[in-house]
Amino acid sequence: MSWAERALGESLERAGAVEARLEGRWPLYADPASGHWTTTARGSWTGGFWAGLLWLRAVMGGSPADRATAVGRTAALAPWLQADTATRGLILWYGTAFGVMAGDASAVALRDRAARTCLDACDPELGLVPWGGAFGGPRELARVDGLPGLLRLLRLAGPGGEAAAQSQLDRQLGLTTGKRELPPAWRALPGGAWEPYPDPPPGWSRTVGWLSLAVADTGDGDRRRALLAHPRVAARFAAGSPAVPLVRPGGPPDTSAAAIEALAALKLAAWTGRDSRPAGRGGAAPLRDRAAGVLRELVAEHLRGGRLLDGCYDADHGVATRHELVWGDFFLAVGLAVLTSAIDPFAC
């Protein structure tokens, strides 16, 4: 058994043990010393990652009991259909993807409802599904963490959904990659103008990961090449770059960002290997090697008993700055599953 297979097994075993203690609540982040989880009643924007992790466990292990648990968790995400938030993509795509892969009819039905709901939420004047007001703050924002999952759901909603997904991605890429510092969030102004919004700030650890994941899922070679040519993006995927980015300059590390980037690199490598025009210097091998190196370092230096530590939930407010994060666990597990060829890179 390889190091990656062992680490994947530890992570999935940990997920099962945590689920047995949650009593229906949803995990957000866990204390690095005690392992105690801070939880929420409805799952917040991270609930889909927990349901997805449980589905991955069920798919890998084949246990009927694990499958039943995953089915129940995914069904519990349905109230998020009505929430005013672009993070419905994170919640309802990642919470259903492995269930759909496993042939679960309820996951298919929820995903299809989510696709139609997301298309209905598109604002034609803004050219996107706005960030929304479910979590407070300005509603009419364009944020990089509103892309993954959402674009894939939109594309399932027919020709109108495909056009909406293209519009959303082009809007966000035009705003964010048009600046060297990659501002992750923008606020709409009257008359069709946009201005950078300070939360999250430029230099945010997860900007490159979320953008790269969304672009990798499009299958569009021109967008991939343009993104990988941006100096900040190229630096993150370069051999020898630190595996784990800082949540902001001078801030704590963010292993969850590294895990997102690793999966994005594996997806980009998969597409690059099929392209007649490579998306990066040297083709697919450097991207896959980068992903493997990042995952290996995460496992060797930050994984303890199936727990990916040193993730940062909210540095500005001092919340869970060196903790286990539910989405960090999810993307690490998925990245390891892809690296070991247990699942297809585009299974989720």
Image (spheres, rainbow, N blue to C red):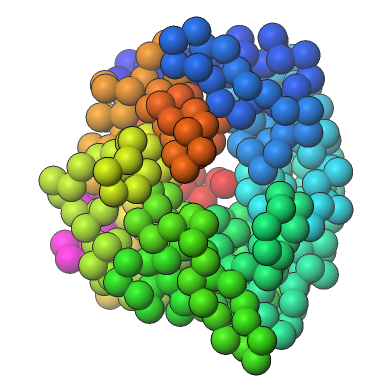
Front residue of this view, candidates 218 and 255: 255
Q: In the rendered structure, does residue 286 fall within the stretch colored magenta?
A: yes
Q: Does residue 257 appear in this view?
A: yes
Q: Residue 42: where, in percent of width, then height?
A: 78, 33
User: Where the N terminus falls, by quadrant?
Assistant: top left
Q: How many marks?
A: 0
Magenta residue span: 280-287
User: Which residue is at 81% across, 64% downward?
Assistant: 116
Q: Residue furthest bottom?
A: 191
User: Which residue is at 71% across, 53% downward?
Assistant: 136
Q: Residue furthest front?
A: 317
Q: Residue 326: where, in percent of width, then height?
A: 56, 30
User: Which residue is at 37% across, 66% downward?
Assistant: 182
Q: Is residue 289 above or below residue 328?
A: below
Q: Is residue 195 above or below residue 43?
A: below
Q: Residue 6: where, in percent of width, then height?
A: 37, 16
Quadrant in which residue 26 is drawn: top right
Q: Does residue 289 appear in this view?
A: no
Q: Is residue 132 left or right of residue 271?
A: right
Q: In the rendered structure, does residue 332 fall within the stretch colored magenta?
A: no
User: Which residue is at 79% across, 39% downward?
Assistant: 77
Q: Is residue 266 above or below residue 314?
A: below
Quadrant in which residue 250 is drawn: top left
Q: Is residue 180 left or right of residue 271?
A: left
